[in-house]
Image (tube, rainbow, N blue to C red):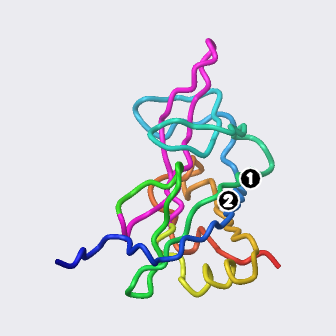
Amino acid sequence: MASVGYLRPSAKINAVVIQVNGRKLPGIRCNPGPDGPHENVHVGIGSKGIATELVRGDAPAASWRVEIRAVPMPDGSIDYRGPLVDGKRGDRFLYLNWVNVEPDGRARLFRRAKVMLSGLEPAVVRRAIESSRELHCTVELTDAKGNPSCARFAPEAISWRVLE
């Protein structure tokens, strides 16, 4: 019986470092919805609603480095794995989590943005693996209304490159 959709034992798993570079942060204050205003906005990378490596919303830029595993699939696509990789196969992503740091120091999640991995060209990932180079992506962290970016980054708000 064939195990369709499962990783074959012979499939090679490759480690890849991804650096997410955020620019155009929205500021330390915002009011994007009914649960605001937020007076101490920070953004971090994370999973399951947890934000780590927090950067203030008024910083000039933000950057996070993540090591993931790239798994070549029989159809030529690449699947992604790792502690910070979310989503189901064919729809994998990294979360950027927006939090308000409360006076007691607790980080309260109020918005998330997805850095899509599944839309990444397999040829770009293969080039990074074959040359042992990092993948860098740049994302715009402020939406058209001046609030923290959320949902999936639109193609015009994200760019990928292999670090030379």
Residue at image point 68% right, 37% down: 54
Amino acid of disc 1: Ser
| Disc 1, SS | strand
- Tell me: 59 left or right of 110: right
Asked where in the image residue 51 lies, by quadrant, the reply is: top right
The residue nearer to you, when weighing 139 against 52, is 52
The residue nearer to you, when weighing 110 against 80, is 80
**Residue 13 in picture, x, y percent from top left:** 54, 70
Q: Is residue 121 magenta?
A: no
Q: Quadrant of the N terminus?
A: bottom left
Residue at image point 61% right, 79% down: 125
In the picture shown, does residue 76 fall above or below 26?
below
Count residues near mark 1 (Cα–Cα under 10 Å), then give few for <14, some for 14-19, many for 20+. some
User: Which numbered tag is attached to residue 63?
Assistant: 1
Q: Main secondary structure of the magenta part?
A: strand
User: Magenta segment, which residues?
Assistant: 89-116
First in sequence, mark 1 or 2: give its number: 2
Q: Is residue 106 magenta?
A: yes
**Residue 68 in picture, x, y percent from top left:** 59, 60
Kindly identify which residue carries mark 2.
20
Q: Mark 1 and 2 residues: CB-CB less than 8 Å, in contact?
A: yes
In the picture shown, does residue 77 fall above or below 138?
below
Q: For the view shown, which residue lies furthest in the left direction?
A: 1
**Residue 98 in picture, x, y percent from top left:** 56, 40
Residue at image point 57% right, 47% down: 148
Q: For the view shown, which residue lies furthest in the top direction?
A: 104
**Residue 93 in picture, x, y percent from top left:** 48, 60
Work out how far the residue at label 1 is from the one at label 2, CA to CA, in angstroms.
Answer: 6 Å
- Tell me: 48 left or right of 5: right
- Tell me: 80 left or right of 127: left
The residue nearer to you, when weighing 125 against 97, is 125
Amino acid of disc 2: Val
